[in-house]
Amino acid sequence: MNRREPLRVAVIGTGRMGADHVRRIDRVVSGARVTAVVDTDAERAKAVAAGVDGCAAYTDPAAAMAAADVDAVLVASPGPAHEAALLAAFAHDLPVLCEKPLTPDAASALRVMEAEQALGHRRVQVGFMRRYDTEYVRLKALLESGQLGRPLMLHNRHRNVASPPFFTSAMLISDSVAHEVDATRWLLGHEISAVTVLRPTPSSGAPDGLRDPQFVVLETDGGALSDVEIFVNCGFGYQVQAEVVCERGTARIGDGHALVTHMAGRWGGTITQDWTDRFAQAYDDEIQAWVDTTRRGGVTGPSTWDGYAAAAVCEAGVRALEEGGRVEVALVEKPALYR
Amino acid sequence: MNRREPLRVAVIGTGRMGADHVRRIDRVVSGARVTAVVDTDAERAKAVAAGVDGCAAYTDPAAAMAAADVDAVLVASPGPAHEAALLAAFAHDLPVLCEKPLTPDAASALRVMEAEQALGHRRVQVGFMRRYDTEYVRLKALLESGQLGRPLMLHNRHRNVASPPFFTSAMLISDSVAHEVDATRWLLGHEISAVTVLRPTPSSGAPDGLRDPQFVVLETDGGALSDVEIFVNCGFGYQVQAEVVCERGTARIGDGHALVTHMAGRWGGTITQDWTDRFAQAYDDEIQAWVDTTRRGGVTGPSTWDGYAAAAVCEAGVRALEEGGRVEVALVEKPALYR
Amino acid sequence: MNRREPLRVAVIGTGRMGADHVRRIDRVVSGARVTAVVDTDAERAKAVAAGVDGCAAYTDPAAAMAAADVDAVLVASPGPAHEAALLAAFAHDLPVLCEKPLTPDAASALRVMEAEQALGHRRVQVGFMRRYDTEYVRLKALLESGQLGRPLMLHNRHRNVASPPFFTSAMLISDSVAHEVDATRWLLGHEISAVTVLRPTPSSGAPDGLRDPQFVVLETDGGALSDVEIFVNCGFGYQVQAEVVCERGTARIGDGHALVTHMAGRWGGTITQDWTDRFAQAYDDEIQAWVDTTRRGGVTGPSTWDGYAAAAVCEAGVRALEEGGRVEVALVEKPALYR
Amino acid sequence: MNRREPLRVAVIGTGRMGADHVRRIDRVVSGARVTAVVDTDAERAKAVAAGVDGCAAYTDPAAAMAAADVDAVLVASPGPAHEAALLAAFAHDLPVLCEKPLTPDAASALRVMEAEQALGHRRVQVGFMRRYDTEYVRLKALLESGQLGRPLMLHNRHRNVASPPFFTSAMLISDSVAHEVDATRWLLGHEISAVTVLRPTPSSGAPDGLRDPQFVVLETDGGALSDVEIFVNCGFGYQVQAEVVCERGTARIGDGHALVTHMAGRWGGTITQDWTDRFAQAYDDEIQAWVDTTRRGGVTGPSTWDGYAAAAVCEAGVRALEEGGRVEVALVEKPALYR
């Protein structure tokens, strides 16, 4: 492909996750636009399409994939609908980003895998988005650097404020721990060979009958262990933490702090060396705010008055530096335009 | 304006900062594209323009602003060139994002302010980008919530690894502390009324003759104090920290931690309540990575194999939950396509 | 008893731990003194006794316990010698502090317990000293306050830099995890009902043949789980950490920080309310340093010159407060006595 | 002197601080006992003396110092009474620990200093107890190690929940900042050459008329700066923080964390290498608790049952390690003696 034109994406499913991806492609990501949305609920599809320039609404994924202005597919429908959507995308040889889970069980996942192999090339990226989280990315890079030696154990914490009403004890594993399953495989580079699930007395904060929390031990074919506390009605916040214990030290993420290591008699983290790194997000948001406001015909942010006041204070500051003592700052009266 | 088409931006100045803004608008920000770049160095302008679809190179800012495909101007040229660029933009009534400083001194800033007033409406956003930094934004919101009471003092730390060769003692004020001048005004909502600069013995790590570090005390017309440690050859890292001391507590940012408060007998921070908040960056980067790789005709990220392996482990996990004990995971052999 | 005279203690065993307890009673603890030390190595016993005023050396515990100037016994001999020492102490009806383990196995512990019951009153305090660690004490108090609700899980980390040469795989459990066994029982108030030990691939930093690290899961009769990472050749430091997960929040100790809780949307800790609390250790150490130096005929610490200089600076400070501006401090020349 | 007998101390002043020192010498410190207490309030002196074995009550300091059983003097009377007490102690050539301030002003301090010089040897230790605080001690040691290079600036925070009713604006300097004055001199090894006091608008939480907070800048004859935020009605807690900025890095104490450094691209702290270091306080408190309870004829702490239960669990653990899988723990029924 190697195209300069924006990628034209069909988003399958316009529930909470699908609608959020539509917003993301429309407003956040550069180089792509949403040209089709699909939902079995035609009204919902139309409502989402209406908010996006040049976006059509469909109820049938295959119809959207057959459209001339669709280059790629993002699957965000419920899990049981994934297999059909993936096979349809393969039929049109379209690249797919498929939200997790790939499919709800191993047998259907195997069928999808066989179909992709029949195609002869990879077409699917699965939505295990933790692999893109800045903290996980740093943890992975640190492990690959070899500084800490070989990983021996991985301790994971996964806590939600409250589970949705339809949540079952099995979903703590298949829906929640699924993330740690992928994180374990990715961080350690091993396949998981056995699973043990321990069930402490449920919290009185959990709905009746729900086994919450659970404690899961994953053994890997590389000999490392990964344990997971999953607690979906902890009540106090959303927390995802991971601590890798290696032969020469440990590294932890998810603590409110950035990556913290313990090795060679010291604990701590790194310090940014450059302002472009420290303030990258601020620059991005500043320019985005300017673009957004300007497109709406407005003006926002620090004004000419702010620029003037800063110049006046800095002038006084330089005098104070050079002459010593305290220097007063004199400003003109603030013009009406800037009040 | 209120346009659906992308905003077409002329970027004035293609040095380090200008070139970075061109990249930002081209690759990061949505809803805008760079249609003109301007530099007195024609070769540099051409080189930058060559990397962007539909972007022309100019040596004269006014010529770029007169082009039909320019809706807005981003000024990233050296400070002394700002006044002329701003006046030219006003002549075309174009919205401007002007990098800090607005102009190098109060007198020229005053002229710009008068010209904008003559225009009758605001056109300028000054590039004090800390107002867009997530941590500063949270600190500002906390102050405005009134939880901590009225601010009494603001302690600032501003440290750079090393200063560039051309840096003078006065530039520690006019170039570096300029950021804290704006942050003080913005966070406290007061104008600065007096400045004192204290000069400890310079660090032996600073170039000969440079008064580094300095300690600056800013008094405000609201009665609050703001002190600034500026140390541009600290050697160990880039650090920007701010601690506001209020009537009922303190709040600190820039410590590697997110916002930390001390009030009512407790120190600490808040815990995210939702996964969309905790992992927003991961989702954005995931979709951006997919778009970028797909446009290049490639495939990246978690594969169908990863989706299958996760499904198989979760199935075993659910059995372990329901039956108790340890359950082994059986995977098919890994197909060549996913190795 | 209820005595005003110091308690006269016989210390059984003068190895590393025993000798340290002799020093502790002699130099740190108030209200007690060591009047007898016992070791099968007579020379070692004599050497230790020689350092303490009025202390006799013995090779036979029973002989020491029969001495007229012995009120209580501290057992710090190797584990296999504990049973005999305890029974001897019971024979003299003496109170005993017995280092952990009480005895090396459950059968001998049962015999000791039966002997104490025959005595009709408790005489033994076992040396599980974590129950006296400030952080554990705070964690226990927090759990008992009920603020966090019922404990569901306890995550423990126990890491040593390197294991001594005689250490076996079983000793990771019986010597090291023994501490977490007691901490779990004490913190949760439950008995342990089942144990599972998982064995990741050993670290290459561990001696050949040693199963290090291990991961232990303790189930309790109250339905809570306690897991323990034991890693005795981690190489980087000594760490003992515990995190309790309760129905309404978590609490963690051992992180370099004091007790940190996560609950109700916030993480953090408490702030001391009083200087007597914050500086209790400083006052204790200050007076102890003064007593020690004075007994040796010396003088230490801040001098009269320091008191004078502080008074002169504070006088200048009060003038600066009252008159505004900068006030210089004039000191007399520093006398030779204080140089 | 070099005595083996306990040091016999007269404590002058039995207010809050004096009474606490009496308790400290009687109950915490080893090698000393209080043989005399002095207070102009005879009833108060008697009440305090009554709680200590062999302690006499006096109203006249000189009478106490003349007693045969007094080897040393601790002065904890109000500041204005210090000069007389110190001169009386010099007359008896007794060693003195004098609470801060040495005397209330520089002139009287000078007289005391001259009297001590006339004596020909040092007799006074002034009670600047921060020099004995573990965190300050570590900070001082780090500065002396030279790792961070020469100190350039010291930032201090000193916050109290609320000031006592008699507190004046000048006392923020002479009573509170006095501690930072000594800490600055001690940590930096310089004399203070000038003082500036800045006065932000007082907090509405401060009593009417009290200038609280204040911001004090101390200049030293070594060219380093020390700034102090003093805020005695901050409402939320007691905080004493210090951050030293050196040529190659910074170090901070008082944050709830132990000493944290920033240098060479990393922030963080050290990890204990040894259990004797990590648990020294626990061992001390354990033995003290045993001694105290035993002297009262009681038994406390972990019982024989706890020792037995731990042995039984560890036995099961070793079996689980050796045989794999889950091993149940069987305990005998808990005897009545241990319930």
Image (spheres, coloured by chain):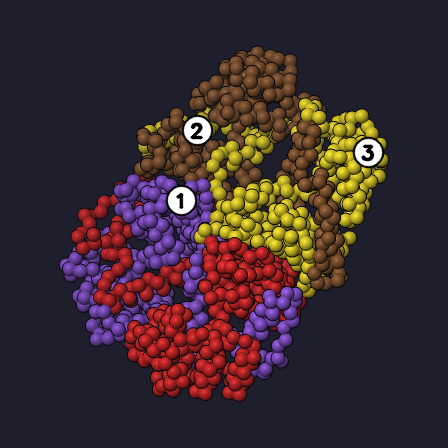
Chain colours: A red, B purple, C yellow, D brown
Q: Secondary structure at mark 1?
A: strand
Q: Secondary structure at mark 2?
A: helix
Q: Chain of mark 3?
A: C
Residue flagged by tag 3: what amino acid is it? Ala
- Comparing D255 with B196, the one in front is D255
Report which residue position mark 2 lands on: D175
Q: Residues within 10 Å of mark 3 (few under 14, many from 20)?
A: some
Cβ atoms under marks 1 and 2 closer than 8 Å: no
Q: Comparing marks 2 and 3, which lies closer to the viewer?
A: 3
Quadrant (top left/top right/bottom left/bottom right) for the N terminus of chain D: top right
- Comparing A179 with B327, the one in front is B327
Of the numbered discs in the image, which one, if any, rests on residue C91? 3
Of the numbered discs in the image, which one, if any, rests on residue B270? none
Report which residue position mark 1 lands on: B250
- Comparing C289 with A309, the one in front is C289
- D37 horizontally vs B13: left or right: right
Question: Compared with residue B193, is residue C197 higher up or lower down, i.e. above or below?
Answer: below
Residue flagged by tag 1: what amino acid is it? Thr
